[in-house]
Structures are given as structure tokens and as C-alpha cells.
Amino acid sequence: MDLASILQILESTIRLSTPLLLACLAGLFSERAGIFDIGLEGKMLAAAFFSAAVASMTGSVWLGLLAGIAASLVLSGLHGLASITFRGDQLISGVAINFLAAGMTVLIAQDWFRQGGRTPSLPSDARFNPITLPFADRVADVPVLGPVYSDLMSGNSILVYVAFLAVPATWWVLYRTRFGLRLRAVGENPAAVDTAGVSVVALRYAAVGICGVLCGIAGAYLATSLQAGFVKDMTAGRGYIALAALIFAKWRPWYALWSCLLFGVLQAVALRYQNIDLGSLVIPVQFMDALPYILTVVILAGFVGKAIPPRAGGQPYVKER
Amino acid sequence: MQDRNGPESATRPGDSPAPAVQPPKAAERGMSSAQPAIELKGISKAFGPVQANKDISISVAPGTIHGIIGENGAGKSTLMSILYGFYRADRGEIFINGQKADITDSQAAIAAGIGMVFQHFKLVENFTVLENVILGAEDGRLLRPSLAKARRELKALASEYGLDVDPDAVIHDIGVGFQQRVEILKALYRQADILILDEPTGVLTPAEADQLFRILHRLKDEGKTIILITHKLREIMEATDTVSVMRRGEMVATRKTSDTGPEELAELMVGRKVLLRVDKTPAKPGADVLQIEDLKVTDESGVLRLKGIDLTLKAGEILGLAGVAGNGQSELLEVLGGMLPAVGTVTGRVRMKGEVLPLSGAAGDGKARRAAHIGHVPEDRQRAGLVMDFFAWENIAFGYHADAGYQRSGLFMDNQGLRREAADKMDRYDVRPPDPWLKAKSFSGGNQQKIVLAREIERKPSLLLVGQPTRGVDIGAIEFIHREIVALRDAGAAILLVSVELDEILSLSDRIAVMFDGKIMGERLPGETDEKELGLLMAGMNNAASGEAA
């Protein structure tokens, strides 16, 4: 395999990992605070639709991004209301959000645009376009390092940089700030936080809010950067893969980066090599397409070994003596 | 170390709400010794129709240890939860150091200088000691400065009060005794001058409890005011200066500890005379019921838990099995009761009235054991004795629910009959409240235990296995449970009693065997031994001349 094709695969790995990474970090904030969120998928989908719709109507991709984040936040608020305030079942609330988003996006899209449940294709100025980093063109000819910088690191949309910078930011917030300490504590033992005189409810809403913002960015990235517009079910299970990646990462930010890159590279390979010819044996494209999902199943089946979720995860907090 | 009270009161978390009451300065404390540290006036609190606290007034002098004693459900915890801002009183006032305090939440209680050590620790298991201490009392948005300050602070507290804990240890790696210290340190780090401890010795070994009381005395000498909530009379007598007794939501008496005694306190708690000793006639042992020969148990990790047990139990006697928890008593009870290890091996010979008891497979499970007339009151009643989310009547039938008497037409259970029977048993065993439709988890520890006992004893077993029969049980209920066990013995059953309470072993047993490290260290007769000798045996020292009893 030559350098060019390696670079191509890595480039597409980065693009495909970005939404996974954003969703994975979104889940990390929520689950570290003790709120399981199976509704990442639905939030991303809603964000994808509203960002594409608003970008298409106003011509401004930034307004689109805001609309996507807002849509995702509304669903987050719903999940928070159900699981924090009313102490409902977090799984059921999440599933409901996924169904709601899947149906609502197509319905509204058909009503607004009449294109069979999709938004119109976004023109290039209503999308997030690749950014060229300084000196990218000048160093392109330097062997190896040049193309790595100019093709791989440069030339991505701003949301890609946001996603990758979100990893150290998440780590820093979680392990270096008061908010992070309290967030981690509330997912492990909310009673400890409560008796220390800190509001469990406020912390959990904050976590769910951050989750909403990150899911919103992830959805907007799908519709306004990776692709040009919204199509039905365009998240294609990325929310669930992000959850698998989160378990694989044992709810840690840096591990989340590596596990999302792993899922990303699998998707990239599947895209690039449709049928892999091994001489006597041809691996069909369907297998390659299915690989990320197979890996998800394998990981969820416990291949990762002992991944200990936040202890208070999934349980509503009820004050007791 | 420099004066801790001066500069640090100024460095409270910058963003916490203004304290309701300023923590007292060291100087003030000395001047106003007449001023009570805590004064509650007419506190009342109802939960629906239940009056948990009725017009309670109490006054605690600074620099003293004040005990609050009462049975479970007497309202002790509710009262302390009001003081710590978990609940708001319906009526009544709280004064801290003479100033009226409006304690609306835990934050306000902390600000008023109150610290609380809960019965179930409120610690984050995978955090370090340091992180647990600063949680909620950080100095700013960034952790680093807070952690550095807390580290210095903990060092000072450790040398001041003898509260040594490794600040970098993770909570789940340290023992309960140390976890409790962390809770105390949390309170002290928040400048608490008043420390409330709720049943602090429930989880501690006797040695750890002694250590705790030494620390409490040291805190008292430094001028801290301590409220100790407990239902153990001995602790009250040993550790407190004054004591208040609560019964059914009311404060029935306050005494100077030196002016009262265990008998009076027990009577005040229960509302009637209580027998603190067990009243029983000498045993009349009959034929051998249980014969254990060379019983060995290997657990899932290949460790030998029982290293060859030989034990014989006769009809009409109580054999008390003493030992520090974790020396094989649990494994012995479980094997006999039919809770065989899922992985691991059991070898040896166990005969029940001459019949060999299977030690593996379905023939050795709980159902088969019950068919062999073995009743089992498991050590952990909440995990193995009851299904906490099921109703009392269901719990009273469990294990025997397939009995022919409970069947209707082979397909359905006779639920009405079960409920009638449960109501009857609950009545006879004085389970309070006697409502078969309450879930097991809604009963207090003592009443849960009575439900399990009612189920097992009423089957008239030939052998009753009893593990920790009175752990977490009120005095009144302890008396009742002991009486029922003795009554079963007098009816001719053999009883194997496992308890970590030496008092209980000594007063209830007809014969005592001591276990250590998976072996029987020796047998003694209760009249011919004492706590000291048993204590040595429990520690694995058998230098006392091998005077094998019986």
C-alpha cells in the first residue's frame, strides 16, 4: 500500500471518526454524571435535520449549527426532565427520544421541503468547508511529513478540529476542575455530593446539557460538513456505535479518542476497499460494511474485559436518611 | 502547626452561600461555656400520618459527648436529619451556640459548624481520600490549589487528633475503620465544631470501635461537641457524658450518664422492663442430630475456607460458634443450609440423624435441606433471607411455597391461605406493623428478622441454623428473638448459632465452639470460660491448656 492510499484512508478515518467522537464525549459527560443516554442517536439525528434545514433556509451554516444544537438541547432537556426530575427509566426515555427524532425529522422535512423527507442539497457556502492550516501548501512537497500535514491535518472542517480539541478539554474539565470532580462524584455516589451540600439535580442537568451541545455539533457535522444536507436516518447507528466506543473507552476521554478512531478506521477501510481480493478468497463489501457493527456487538458482548460503568449510572437519585 | 481556627475560617469556599451562623471562634467557646452548643426547642416532624418527632427539646453543652439512644424507628435519625438540613421541621427552633439557626439544607448545616457521619458512609468509592475530603468544599474552580491545601490540612488534623489516613489511598482499598475516619476528617475539614455520629460502630470490629472512641474523646478534649446516636447501651455507658432516650418519636428522658445504668436506659427505651440476660434452664441434650466429619470447603479461587471441621450437635442444645467474621463460620452455615459454592469443592461427611447429607448438586440445595428438616436463618437477612421488594406474606412463604398445603388444584397457589397464615405468624411474632401487604424493605431490621424467624421456626425444624440473629436489631426485639430460639431448643431442636457478638454467644449457648482460620480451635462450656479466653481462641491462640469440654 502506498503512502497516498494510506493517507486517503487516514483522512477519511478522521472525517468518519469526528461524529463518533463528539457523540462519545457527549455520552461520557452524561454517563459520568450517572445519566445513561441511549438517545445520542436521536439527538444527533434531530440536530442533523435542523442544522441542514436552517442552513438551507437562511444560507448561514452558523445559524444552522445553532439550530442543530438547540434541537439537541431540547431533546436533552426532555431526557433530563424524565430521568432527573421525574426519576423515570433512563433507557425508556432514551429509546423514546430516538423514535421521536426518527419520525419527527422525516415528517417535518416532508412538510417543509417536499423532497421525500430530505432537505435540499446545501450549496457550498451553506456548509462547513475545509480549512487550510497555515503553510499547508508550502510544505506539501516535503516528503512524508509534508503530505501528513497538508492532507491529513490541514483541510478539515472546523468541526473536526472542535471534536479533536474537545478530547483534552474534556480530560481537563473532568480531572482538573471542581465541576469535573463533582460530576464524577455524582455518577458514583450522588448521596456523597448531596450531603456535601451540592445540588445533585443541578449537576446532572449541567451534564445532560453538555451532552446536548456535543450531540448537536455531531449532528450538524453530519449534515453540513460530512454530507450536504439531511437524508432520512442519516446517523445510521452512529449514536449506538458511540455508546459502544464509550464502553470500550471505559468512560475515559483519551481512551474515547482511540476507540472512536478505531471505529472510524474500520468504516474508512470499508468505504475504500469494496471487495478485498485475497487471491483464493474475496471478502465481500457487505462484510466490510458490517465490520464496525460486528465489532460493536463483540465489544458489547464483553470482549473488552472489565469495564466498570459509573456506579450510580441509570439510577434516579432519591434522597434517603 | 499554627492556629487553625484563625486564618482558615476566612478561607471557606468562596462561592458558598453566606453561612447562616458563623462558626464559633475558639475564644468565644471558652467565654460562653454556659451557652449550649446545640439547643433544639419543640421540634416536631410528621411524615404523613406518622409523627416521627413530637415536640422534642434538647440541650447539649459544648465540649461534651451526648448520647441519643432509642430503638429503630424511635425518631433519632429523623431528628438528626433535621439538624443536618435533610428535612425541615414542621415546628420548632434550632439554636447553635445560642444563636437561632435556620438550617434549610446541608450547606446551611455545614456553614453552622455541624458535621455528620452517616451510618452508611457518603464516600465516593473510586476517589482518593483527598478528593473525598474536598468534594463540595473546594476553594475555587480549579482543583490543584484545593488539593494542595487539603493535603496540608489533613496532615495537621492527623497530628492533632490521631486521625492518620493516607491522603492518596483510594476509598475502596481501605478498611471501614479508615473510611469512617475519612468521614470524620470531612467534617473537621469543613470546620465542624459539632459532630453527629449515627450508629458509628455498626460496621466496626471491637478494636476499631475502641479506636473510634479514643478519637472521639480526643475531639472532645479539643472542645468539639459530639452527638452519638446508637442503640448499644454499652457504648452509651462507656463514651458519653449525658444521654437522652427517645421512644416513638418522643424524648422520654435525659440523664447524666454517671447517674444512670443500662437497666434504666433499656427500660426507658422500650417502655417496659427488659431482661438483658437470657433466661433459660440448663439444656437437656438428647440424641445426636448433626454429625460433621472432616468438612472441607474450597472456594472459587482455590482457597481452603474450611480446613476439616468435626462437630457434633445434639437435640435440645444450642451450640454457639464464636469467631471473628471471615474465619469460616459463614461457609459452614452455607454448606449446611444448602447454599453450596457455585464454583469450588466441598468434601467430608455430614450426617443428619444418621442420613448422609449430599454436599453437591441439586440434592444439596436449600430445598433438599428444608426437606431434611433443617431451618436456616441466614447471616445476611437482606440478601439471603428475604426478597426485599416482595410483600411480607410472600416472604413468609418463600422456600415452603411449593408445599402441598399451599397448593390449589396443582397449578395455583392458595394465596389467600398464605396471607391468612402470614398475618397469624406476624401477630404471634410481634412483627410491627403486622401488615402482610407491606414490602420486606419497609420493616425495621428487627422486624425483618422476626419475619425470617417466623418462617423458619414455625416449620419445627430438627436443626436450626442461625447466623447473626440480632445484628442491627433493637433491644426489645433481641429479647424476643433469644426467647424464641431457646423455646425451639426446649422443644427438642438442635441449634447452631453463629454470632460475632461474644455476649450473645456466652449468654445463649449451651456449648461454645471457637472458629479460627477455617478450623475449630476448641470447645468450651459457657459457665467455665470468659470473654478473655474466647478472645484468645478467636485470635488463634490455643495455649490455654487443651481442656476440651464435653
Image (cartoon, coloured by chain):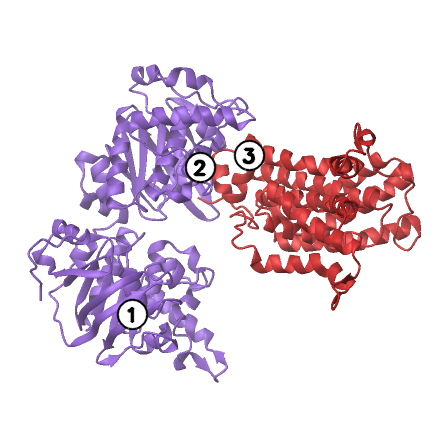
Can the viewer see residue B193? no
From the image, state whether disc 2 or disc 1 is nearer to you: 2
Residue name at image x 80 percent, y 28 percent: A135
Task: Name the residue at 44% across, 23% down.
Answer: B149
Q: Chain of mark 1?
A: B
The purple one among the chains is: B
Q: Amino acid at mark 2?
A: Thr
**Marks 3/2: CA–CA distance:** 13 Å
Chain under numbered label 3: A
Chain in red colour: A
Residue that label 3 marks: A175
Give the alpha-carbon distance from disc 3 to disc 1, as whole Å: 50 Å
Residue A188 position in % (x across, y down): 51, 44
* Amino acid at dot 3: Tyr
Q: Respond whether the residues carrying marks 2 and 1 are from the same subunit.
A: yes
B216 or A117: nearer the eye?
Answer: A117
Instruction: Tell me whether marks 3 and 2 sit on the same chain.
Output: no
Identified at 12% across, 67% down, the residue is B283
Residue to which mark 1 is pinned:
B336
Q: Is residue B71 above or below residue B242?
A: below
Q: Which residue is mark 2?
A: B128
Q: Callout 1: helix, strand or loop? A: helix
